[in-house]
Image (tube, rainbow, N blue to C red):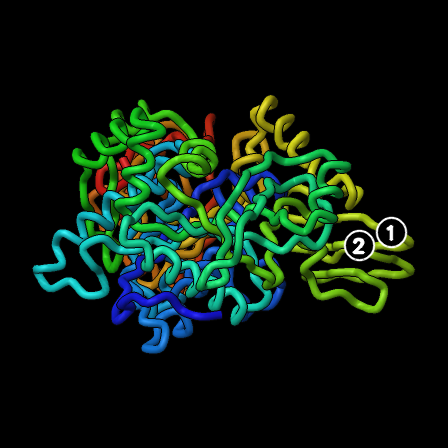
Amino acid sequence: MTNASFDILAIPVIPVILCGGSGTRLWPLSRSGFPKQFLVLSGDDSAKSLFQQAVERLNTPGVSNTSSGIEIGKTLIVTNEEHRFLVTDQLRELPQVQATLLLEPISRNTAPALTLAALHAGKQGSENKQGLTGIGSDPILVITPADQTIQNGAAFTKALQECVSVVAADVSKNTIAILGITPTAPETGYGYIKKGGAQGAYGEFVVEQFAEKPDAQTAQSYVENGNYFWNSGMFVLRASTWLAALKEFRHDIFGATETAWVARSIDQSGDAEFIRPDKEIFKSIPSESIDYAVIEKCPGSKFQVKMVELNAGWNDLGAWDAVWQVGKKDERGNVTSGDTLLSNSNNSLVHATSRLVGAVGIDNLVIIETADAVLVADRANSQDVKSIVNQLEQQQREEKNLHRKVARPWGWYDSVDEGERFKVKRIQVKPGASLSLQMHHHRAEHWIVVKGTAEITNGDKVIILAENQSTYIPQGETHRLANPGKTPLEIIEVQSGSYLGEDDIVRFEDAYGRG
């Protein structure tokens, strides 16, 4: 493979992580309040979530080096307002990564999400004269979903460098590069890309056609043809190229998103920068994907889509069967995580979260246990978990949205028991963190400190409690729980009253911007 002749002395590249999604396909482990991109699926305490893996892949030293001429700028993460603290918590475990969060007030699919990133990247480029590093006047964006897995990092890095080179070499700035996955089976759950023409200088091919998710017979013909690849949803393009293409194909999305962007607000919360487009204007943006809005309309236009092949053990983990496929199997083909015991069982996925799960004589099953829900499914039908999620939504069941253990910016709480007129929670507060100054109309609370030191505001009094000490918060009293120590604080909270819903709360002061 020979390189085209152009200057790659310093190609400015910005990683863009699309971190939306409701997380329904891996229920019950994934919930709308804690979707799959934030899950650690390996069961290894040292393992990272899918989101963390995506961030690290685009910030690996192999991507940015002197031989490739690629300079990585500050990562842009587009995510939902409700997930901002999940993102910041997981980013703290990646101290080498600097990131800015673009917060969507509601989901509008991936086309508006990428538009926010492109508008921000363009703004960064225009400010480069003020001394910002890693950003050019028109940076190249490397876009990836946050919920995929790659087994061969070196192959991914090589393909990504080739995509960047393809885009950088086009002086007309009309090229979009896409990673096409070498198909390993006639999958019906993916869209396909058909390559055409001769191989280019960086191993790229012009995309001749995009094909929708096929039936089984068509998928088999695609694999046998040899010119079809799975659509990975990973793109490389200049910020200006995306904005120009969106203007041409979906000016309505461009106009509404730009208007919401111009009216944005910026909030610095600790070490995190939050950028919020205007909420009311954002609601008016049409919901559309990157593919439907732009990519599939490019063939035959002035915008060329070029594909670089990726053969690196890619999987979008779209169902529990996919998790089994990429998991570490025992001698009988079983993938297990957590406290599990199997006997005479084959080719199954068993995941235990909160208790021992035993299985005897099972074949090709999925068993997923959490503290408040258990899923049992035939592996071949694991895509149909959405039917259970739809029933949960119709019945307005909380198990669709939240786990029993719920993450909060200050820590977490676990609802360990409840009955008529009472609820018991285990609460952990991070060192230096505090809950909001709040009040409840319909319940009183009893707090028992079991670990650490608690600073408690109760009306006009502030007290310090140590382990094995307790206090009582009367119904209607203003109160706050804080951790002044350097180790986590844990308390047991017993609520009693006529209504114990999470919406019975009035916040007077909150360090996390919650109303």
Please name the residue shown 33% across and 53% down the image: 141
Specify whether 126 is left or right of 221. left
Comparing 133 with 515, the one in front is: 133
Numbered badge on residue 363: 1
Q: What residue occupies the far bottom of the structure in this picture?
A: 66
Between discs 1 and 2, the one toward the N terminus:
2
* Quadrant in the picture for residue 64: bottom left
Numbered badge on residue 119: none
Q: How many marks?
A: 2
Alpha carbon separation for disc pair 1 and 2: 6 Å
* Quadrant in the picture for residue 266: top left
Estimate the x, y position of residue 186 in percent, counting from the top left. Answer: 73, 46
Vertical arrangement, residue 18 with respect to residue 501, above or below: below
Please name the residue shown 84% across and 54% down the image: 359
Q: Amino acid at mark 1?
A: Asp
Vertical arrangement, residue 386 with respect to residue 193, above or below: above
Comparing 437 with 319, the one in front is: 319
Please name the residue shown 74% across and 58% down the image: 356
Comparing 486 with 2, the one in front is: 2
Residue 224 appears in view:
yes
Numbered badge on residue 348: 2
Specify whether 289 is left or right of 278. right
Q: Residues within 10 Å of mark 1 (few under 14, many from 20)?
A: some
Estimate the x, y position of residue 156 in percent, counting from the top left. Answer: 51, 64
Residue 413 appears in view:
no
Comparing 418 with 349, the one in front is: 349
Estimate the x, y position of residue 187 in percent, counting from the top left. Answer: 70, 44
